[in-house]
Image (cartoon, rainbow, N blue to C red):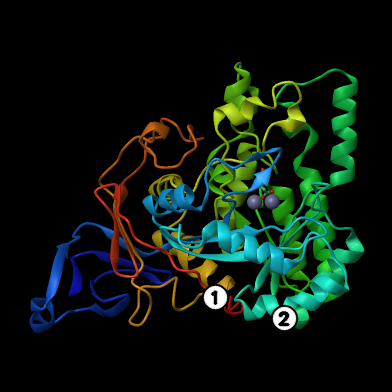
Amino acid sequence: MKKLLRGGFVVTPRGSRRADVLLDGEKIAQVGHISPAEAKSAEVTDVSGCYLFPGFIDAHTHFDLDVCNTTTADDFASGTRSAIRGGTTTIIDFACPNKGETLAYGLDLWHKKADGKCSCDYGFHMTIDDWNEGIEAELDDMFAAGITSFKMYMTYPAMMLPDGDLYRALKALKARGGICGVHCENSGVIDALVAEKKAKGENAVSCHPQTRPDYLEAEAVGRILRIAQAAEAPVVIVHTTNAAALSEIDQARARGQVVYSETCPQYLALDDSVYYQEDWLSSAKFVCSPPIRKKSDQDALWAGLKEGRVNTVSTDHCSFTTQQKLAGQGDFTTIPGGLPGVETRGEVVYTTGVAAGRIDLPTLCRALSENPAKLYGLYPRKGCIAPGADADIVVYDPAADHTLHAADMVSRCDYTPFEGFRTSGSIAAVYLRGMPAVENGVVRDVMGEYLKRGKCAL
Ligand code: URP
Ligand code: ZN
Ligand code: ZN
């Protein structure tokens, strides 16, 4: 039976308007005035007073990832349930072969982790942490498998590539129409700063942000953008955290380069005071790389988002329980790095962005839905409410304020960085390809599909 969502405001990147939405099976059939005859044959749900967003896309998650001698708290089952609870109908996770393993092995491993377990649709980026003829020869197979985006690291010894290999890989990806996200931090200087802290016997959680300052992120952003200039290749700067890094992106664009920028809710809504709490564990919960920055950096990121210089807001969901964070007590460099966020992104960014007057609804729609869909080859199947698109819809009730508590969440992580945060409004319902996936806060059993993605269209 068809479904009719009646009385809502459909949000698009060009504005929001009062419109009914007719779903036919997995697809959106009609948007606007639905004739009484059509309405008669449909199951009608009253969504008056609510905003209807295209299903949110989180293009940066790490589920079931072995890292720091442990495994993330959320696997694909709990992570995607958590995602859909938060309005995310598509995630793109990072398949991550170890150095020495083939891309095919990494892809197969990620399918084994995810297939048959997901509550939302999913795709994979491929991590390139080795560069040689064998890896290059595998790229065409990756594109054939629907992997059109990749990630490289300028830090983390187990994953980083030297500048020459970054250049060669960007060139090879450009030749095939692929794009690459890059984790930008200056590894060598960070290691030296860490060694100095250790030599002085300093081990507070605050050593983490102090040894990974904003300017060492900005240096790496500037460097990869010059490498990309040489390769004549586009780049996605993932998890952009600060004003100096954003300024490097602005400069590269002014030179004519194609650069995309992603940030995350923790960089928009939190500041580095989280690392200076009295209790060690309270601070350790916020350890992620790059670290959370200053209020002035938040302002720069919000301005960037508003002006379209920051293109997407993903989460970098990489969750560890408080018990797992405790493993780093004797050495700040061994605190597992990463935060949960996939369940809270929509409400946190709506609240701190739209309700606070920093951005408007179309900008939110662009950052959470349309831009990631275009950037990662999913548009117009995903990322818009239009006839023919997948019926992925978030029903957002702007009047249903509530308080976020980890205890109420479906993620396996036992804390949220937004504990006690008062939201403006809430996600009332979520549809995944026409299936009611969340109703009254309860996640229904729906099965996500693997998405073979096309090329970047942003
Ligand atoms: O600390 C973080 N962000 N961990 C996740 C991996 C990454 O660098 O994106
Ligand atoms: Zn990263
Ligand atoms: Zn990440």
Query: Could you tell whether 400 is left or right of 75 in the image?
Result: left
Q: Which percent across, then down, holds residue 236?
A: 68, 64
Q: Which percent across, then down, holds residue 282?
A: 57, 24
Pointers 2 and 1 in contact (C-beta within 8 Å):
no
x 53%, y 48%: residue: 75
Q: Which residue is mark 1?
A: 452
Q: Which percent across, then down, holds residue 146?
A: 60, 76
Q: Amino acid at mark 2?
A: Asp
Check disc 1: other Cα within 10 Å, few if <14, some if 14-19, many if 20+: some
x 62%, y 29%: residue: 325
Question: Which element type, helix, strand or loop, lies under badge 2?
Answer: helix
Q: Quadrant of residue 36?
A: bottom left
Q: Where 455 sits versus 341, above or below?
A: below
Q: Where 82 sits versus 26, above or below?
A: above
Q: Does the beta carbon of the residue at mark 1 sit less than 8 Å from ligand 3?
A: no
Instruction: Check residue 363 in the rendering and tell me which mark sits there, or answer none.
Output: none
Q: Which percent across, then down, holds residue 399?
A: 25, 46
Query: Could you tell whether 209 is left or right of 220 in the image?
Result: left
Number of numbered callouts drawn: 2
**Looking at the image, is mark 2 or mark 1 earlier in the sequence?**
2
Depth order, front residue of 368/282:
282
Q: Could one spot residue 156 in this view of the protein? A: yes
Q: Could one spot residue 313 in this view of the protein? A: no
Q: Where 288 sits versus 365, above or below?
A: above
**Quarter of the rendering occupied by the C terminus:** bottom right
Q: Quadrant of residue 390?
A: bottom left
Depth order, front residue of 81/44:
81
Question: Which element type, helix, strand or loop, lies under badge 1?
Answer: loop
**Quarter of the rendering occupied by the N terminus:** bottom left
Q: Which residue is mark 2?
A: 140
